[in-house]
Image (cartoon, coloured by chain):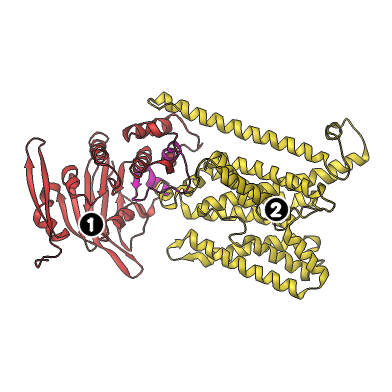
Chain colours: A red, B yellow
Amino acid sequence: MGSIKVENVDFSYAERQILYDISLEANAGEVVGILGQNGCGKTTLLKCINRSLKTNSGDVLLDGENVGEMSRKNIAKKIAFVTQTTNITFAFTVFETVMMGRYACAGDEGNTNEKDLRAVYEAMKDTETLKFADRYINELSGGERKRVMIARALAQEPEILLLDEPTLHLDINHQFDLLELVRKLAREKNLLIMIVTHDLVFASRYCDRVMIIKDGKLHHLGSTKDIMIPDNIEETFYIETEVSEDSRFGINILLIGKSKNNSDDK
Amino acid sequence: MAELNSFEDLREFEETSRRKTVVIVSSVAALAVSTFICAMMVGNYHLSISQVFGVLFGTIHDDTMEYIIFEVRLPRLLCCFIVGAALSLSGLVMQSLFKNPMASPSVLGISSGAAFGASLALAFGVGGFMGSLMVPGMAFIFCFLTMGVVYMLARTKYGVASNTLLLAGVAMGAFFNGLVSLLQYVVNDDVLSSIVYWTMGSLNGCGWSSFALAIAPLAIGMIIVFILIKELNLISAGEEQAANMGVNVVNVRIILIIATALMVGGSVAISGVIGFVGLIVPHIFRMIVGPNHKLLVPLCIVGGGIFMIVMDTIAKSMFSIILPVGVLTSLIGAPFFIYVMRTRKKEIWE
């Protein structure tokens, strides 16, 4: 399983409405990119999906169950959420940090068992964080911390992985590694992965489907090939782009031209 | 440490960490027992170690020694231990819960509220319907009242933010401190000295009745914290992240604040306001063993107990007068804390 259905969701902070009537459906095995300008409501949508925020109206169904009626622990058994922030107030070791991901899945006895340790090992191996298991989290670089946070999310053994700008702080090599891992998790472990990103190039290369949010409204939703076209991108981000097909890798490459912020066309 | 390459390496690493935890907690527990026994020997009537063991195990039958051990020193030391343990554990919980290095039992205004309750009883109520229980009873009641008011003040439509809670606590603390000062200004000299002595914090006069009064709330508070160690670890790493990993942050926070109020209320009720223990003991252990509460909670309980026994023993035996222990915890604790802070090897706070 691992499906999400968002039905007519509205959300507002006090008087300021952020999301307007958002609906979408996503299923296991998919990588769904969420794109849009700063402040358009991308992160807010992820937070509504895992019920960090309560919607004003509309429902979020997780495998058919309304998240509004689920306990936090039951949500965490299905959804792992890697937020933008990598700050941890206290200097826990990397191993302790990743082990925290087992909270929702650990047995009632609360002790670490073989299954917990195996999940932590796999998560740390996949994110290449094993080598600094005994280091303190505040001794790591931003990119290393981000990988630890992703390892912790994977240790939850979720069906759905929500990633909020996962490539932020990562060097180009680790950006590729991470997104390859994301696609592998979707393909091999049948995870549904939803990624908020500003990187249009990565989105066009690694996402199966993308949704574009503008001013809190869903503007486009569909296959990456159909949605990531120059007209849609220009309409949302005010930049000129060109798509060309690279036969060597069998992928579409998004070429970004100039910003149209200062042009009269805007 | 050698780089981890396999699952077996990780398992070995985890087992080594676990063994280290057991060794550290056992060592500190052994130190606590030794400190307890040594403290039994010290006082106006000096006892040798063989006399202490002889009386404890029934091989020496001497009315004076039995009275000193069973009726004076044992209950007083037990009170010292539980008060020290409860205050340091409360400080640990608050620092972790609010992610603030300055958090301690006084930060939410709880200690000040309790001080006002006790001062009110000392000023107007002693000998009333609650008799000798009036002062500790009022301290305990005001402890909870303050906690309730602070929580209500910090509550908004979107929940309770830790920073707002802290600010509400600081404001309520200042308010109650003002009320205590006002009381001190209007009462007569005898009551004034009682209030001042009580707000300095002291374990003089603590006996079995004090122990009986405090043990239940303190034990309940400590058990709650033990049960919520995992949640405390996750919340201390970040509330939003803890919620994403399945912790019901709002409920856990309320339960831990109640546990803290039980521990602070129980302690203040029998010892008055003893400052600094709740601030420095958790910091010292966090600097030594890191932020994992699986290790920190038992260490703060045992270490806080040892700290208070040592302070009380010094306060009653090193000077020509018996000092209020609260004065000594600040005078000795602060420089020791600065020493540990300056020589620590790793950063604990981001």
Q: Residues within 10 Å of mark 2 (few under 14, many from 20)?
A: few
Chain for numbered disc 2: B
Considering only vertical position in the picture, is A264 above or below A165?
below
Q: Which mark is residue B180?
A: none
- Residue at image location 70% in from the left, 62% down from the top: B139
Examine the image and state in which quarter residue A239 appears: bottom left
Quick one: SS at disc 1? strand
For this view, does B268 lie left or right of residue B155?
right
- Let me know if residue A63 appears in the view: no
For this view, does B69 lie left or right of residue B13?
right
- Let me know if residue B339 appears in the view: yes
Instruction: Let me know if residue A36 is in the magenta part.
Output: no
Pointer 2: what residue? B331
Quick one: SS at disc 2? helix
Badge nearest the viewer, 2 or 1: 2
Examine the image and state in which quarter residue A22 appears: bottom left
- Residue at image location 23% in from the left, 52% down from the top: A198
- Residue at image location 64% in from the left, 54% down from the top: B262
Pointer 1: what residue? A23
Residue extent of the magenta highlight: A71-99
Same chain for labels 2 and 1? Say yes or no: no
Task: Say what amino acid the circle numbered 2 marks.
Answer: Leu
Q: Residue B190 in the image: x percent, y percent?
A: 83, 68
